[in-house]
Amino acid sequence: MTGYAYERAATPEQAVRRARQPGAAFVAGGTNLLDLIKVGVERPALLIDIGRLPLAGIEPAPDGGVVIGALARNSDVARHPLVRERYPLLSQALLAGASAQLRNMATMGGNLLQRTRCYYFYDPAFERCNKRAPGSGCAALDGINRIHAILGASEHCIAVNPSDMNVALAALRATIRIAGMDGERRIPVSDLHRLPGERPQQDTTLAPGELITAIELPPQGYAAHSCYLKVRERASYAFALVSVAAGLELRDGKVRSAALALGGVAHKPWQAEAAERALAGRGLDEAAIDEAAEAAVRGASPYAHNAYKIPLAQRAVARALRRAGGME
Amino acid sequence: MFVSDPASRAGPVPRLARPVVLQVNGRRHELTLEPSVTLLDALRDGLGLTGTKKGCDRGQCGACTVLADGRRINACLTLAVMQEGVAITTVEGLGTPQAMHPMQAAFVRHDAFQCGYCTPGQVCSAVGFLAEWRRDAGAEREPGAVPGHAEIRESMSGNLCRCGAYVNIVAAIAEVAAGGHE
């Protein structure tokens, strides 16, 4: 880890202005960026420390939602009474991620921008990685690809987004606030992360220098009926093979609306809209659940080592829905 | 000096070195550090506080766990310069061989280690865990409730012990949590 300059931003405007120079990177918690610098994947010339900017608040919004500052720590958000009460799905997802130490350091904005844990991306000893070295190829395609994507991948990249939090935000239809040179813009979280296509080096739609300032949660939090289910290879402190964020709005024994997103299956948190539609207006019975689970992985295409993810994702969706609906 | 990557040891970049003021175990320290120096390397190489251990240096093992304003963090994944103005507590600040912190004493009583390399991180993490648990006013609990073994194991999953002393580590933390020897 060598040879970069460091400065502390005094205001968000200053941070955005300074970040326009080549080689500049924002740092807040540092848990992903410093790791990537150490392994030689990221090589910034300048770190702009945004960690002390006043963007860590967690406030109720006039519309009945909640606004979470981008610099709020993952652990603080997970335990905040407003989040616990209105968005237990987000609280569960945050607590399913990383370790207690990392959750104390990592910020919400940083978690949104977490980079993939594809081992071919994370280790420069592998020559081929279109995300790390555009045009070099993808070593995962013909390598060990058991942790890789089953949905939305391209011939250039089959990496998956590693975040638990992002899956809950996708299900909850969060909005991301972004500051840039031309002021502020707001986009649905589904428009923040990209599918790899021909430019897997670009994880998100952020322009250079843009700064995530807050996450807006809508009033509907599915607090009464939600479940974050994470399937992993050990009980704690491991990335998801597959995860599911499920929320149900139930009335008179029928699903009024459903929110469903999957993690560990694609380059971005996967909003399972066909599955949501399959549930709407129906009683939550096994037939509806099976149909939703099938719809959630429709179009999935596996590689040599990850075909197991398709039935795993279906069963995880079914279990998450049953738990959200109080059936198990 | 004070670099974490052997490859860069040959050619430090002196123009980037800057004064860094750290608050560690109640004392103020003025250092001159490259921005890229981690808190872990500043503690060990800069201040000689070698109680905090370097295991993986990647945030995966927890051997470098210290308390920052009372919250446990991985000292290997933060820069020293990022921690200016933050009160850092290392294992040296928790207790001494003559006057051990209750958590240290419980680790000794329960034989909660074998080689001991992960122990400073385990102890700091355990102290941080109990502080978090007691501060967690939002949780619905019976009066006098104490964290169960499953909760302790989950919350301590960021601290690995290659000797496998987990059962005794959990027992030590549970005892302090119950107030047995505090």
Image: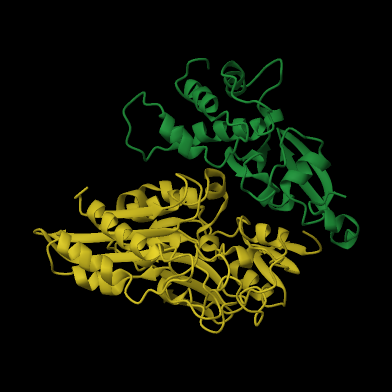
Chain colours: A yellow, B green
In the rendered image, residue B19, in percent from the top left (x then y), is placed at 82, 51
Q: Using the image as rendered, state which of residue A104 and residue B55 is in the foreground.
A: B55
Count of marks placed on residues: 0
The one nearer the camera, B109 or A232, is A232
- Is the residue A260 above or below the residue A322 in the image? below
Q: A136 left or right of A306?
A: right
- Does residue B164 lie above or below B18 as drawn? above
Q: Position of residue A149 (x, y in %)?
A: 46, 69
Residue at the spot x=71%, y=77% of the render? A21
Q: Which of the 4 image quadrants contains residue A324?
A: bottom left
Which quadrant holds residue A101?
top right
Q: Is residue A4 visible?
A: yes
Q: Quadrant of residue B133?
A: top left
For the point 43% across and 67% down, which residue is it? A265
Q: What is the residue that sits farthest to the front in this orientation?
A: A304
Residue A37: x and y, percent? 70, 62
User: In the image, residue A222 lies at what x, y percent?
Assistant: 26, 58
Q: Quadrant of the N terminus of chain A?
A: bottom right
Taking the image as drawn, is residue A10 in sight? Answer: no
Task: Determine the residue located farthest toward the left in the rendered image.
Answer: A252
Q: Which residue is at the front of the view, B45 or B143?
A: B45
A22 to B85, vertically: above or below? below
Task: Describe residue A35's horizontal placement relative to residue A257 as left or right.
Answer: right
